[in-house]
Image (cartoon, rainbow, N blue to C red):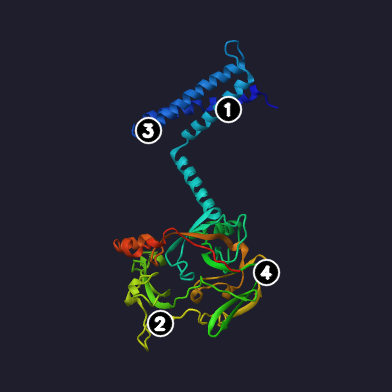
Amino acid sequence: MKTVQDKAKALSDLYCSRRQGFKQTIANLRALTPWGTNKLRNKGQALFDEAERLYHEITKGMIGTAEGGMTNAIVRRRCRRLKKVYKALHEMSKPWWRQWIEAVGIALFLALFLRNFVFGLYHVPSESAETTILVGDRIWGNKMAYFFNTVKRGELVIFDDPQFDIDRSSTLHYYWQRYVGLPVPLFGLKAGPANWVKRVIAAPGDTIEGRVENGKTVVYLNGKLLEEPYVNRLPLIHMQREHGFISLQSFGPFMIPDFLKKGKRIVRRSFDIRYAPEEQPYYKISPEDIIQNPLTGKPIFDEAYTPTMRDYHGSIADEFGPFVVPAGKYWVMGDNRKNSGDSRMWLFLDEELIHGRASVIIHSLDSDEAFWVFDLLKHPIDFWTRIMRWNRFGMVLKSADIK
């Protein structure tokens, strides 16, 4: 077992081996231009002076001379303080590039930890949860919600695409897709699964059934007809929306990413017939973007609660079951039943894929762009007055009472 003197000697020898290096670090700081370095230079000099004092005191304490002798307790205190000062000087002595690499590495680690285990920010690109959640909403997801609590009926859960086939060819590929998710083709690293938001309708042990009664779609839970006030009651209007701002397919040998390419796509959005297209409460719609029926010359609508959704086999998606939800599984559905791929298509959601609860809308833009800066560049005035949905900032996403 090492004695106090042995530990003190080891520490003194370690400091002595780095002494000249620390001294050179302070000298280098003095040689720098004075702007912004005075505080750092003074701090370094103070640390070095303190280290020198502690080193000499510990050396005298080990010798145990009459005039400078110290008790073991005092030597321990001096050693503890010298360790801290040594670490501070060691950090200051690292090359600037190493400090940057370590700082970036720590920042990335913290970002990944927070993103995977504490909270997540999610951009909503689809209409599957209208009118609770709109295209262009940015959602705060609480990833700690289910650390100590179980998933409950009525909650809006965030989960990985249950149909995504994760790469299990190697441990690196598996964990990269699951916890990082960014594609790096140069190193053969693929993108991870998309994140979806749906409402939990049935929990393990529940019996769930979908029917069409009197031409309307309904859901039964444990033999009881569900009243579902959260389901979108508005018709969906067929329209086209513009996205991207680069008309080129490539720039020299480089292909333009899809999210940058300028184009239009067909969408179906909630439409309140009491308001004009430009005055809609959820999306501001330009009349020229509305798709007309070529036979009637009128807008095309999909009416709510009508059984037009089809599953992957071509059958009516809203006619299903009755199913008993297995242990560790959930039945989830989008609030916009006319335009949601959910358990009606792929049946039960595995509990392991759920990684949070949708809690708050941080901000919201009436936009189909992948990044808000695209709209700001294209519409610098309208961005603040028309595109930004100020009334949705900070909106709390509440769970439904499903019994």
Q: Which residue is mark 3?
A: 37
Give 76 or 307, whichever is nearer the viewer. 307
* Residue depicted at 59% across the width and 66% down the height: 153
Tell me where residue 377 appears, x and y as whole percent.
Answer: 32, 61
Above or below residue 251? Residue 321 is below
Viewer-side label of 1, 3: 1
Image quadrant assignment for residue 201: bottom right
Q: Quadrant of the N terminus?
A: top right
Mark sitting earlier along the chain (4/1)? 1
Q: Of helix, strand and loop, which one carries label 2?
A: loop
Above or below residue 28? Residue 376 is below
Viewer-side label of 4, 1: 4
Q: Which residue is mark 4?
A: 205
Give 62 or 76, whichever is nearer the viewer. 76
Image quadrant assignment for residue 345: bottom right
Tell me where residue 280 appears, x and y as whole percent.
Answer: 37, 72
Question: For mark 1, does the 10 Å Cα neighbourhood hold few (<14), some (14 to 19), or many (20 or more) residues?
Answer: some
Viewer-side label of 2, 3: 2
Measure how far apart labels 4 and 2 are at the Cα level.
41 Å
Q: Which residue is mark 1?
A: 80
Above or below residue 61? Residue 355 is below
Q: Of helix, strand and loop, which one carries label 1?
A: helix
Tell me where residue 67 appears, x and y as whole percent.
Answer: 57, 10
Mark sitting earlier along the chain (1/2)? 1
Measure how far apart labels 1 and 2 are at the Cα level.
77 Å
Amino acid on which the number 4 mark rests in the picture: Gly
Measure how far apart labels 1 and 3 are at the Cα level.
28 Å
Q: Which residue is mark 2?
A: 300
Image quadrant assignment for residue 401: bottom right
Viewer-side label of 1, 2: 2
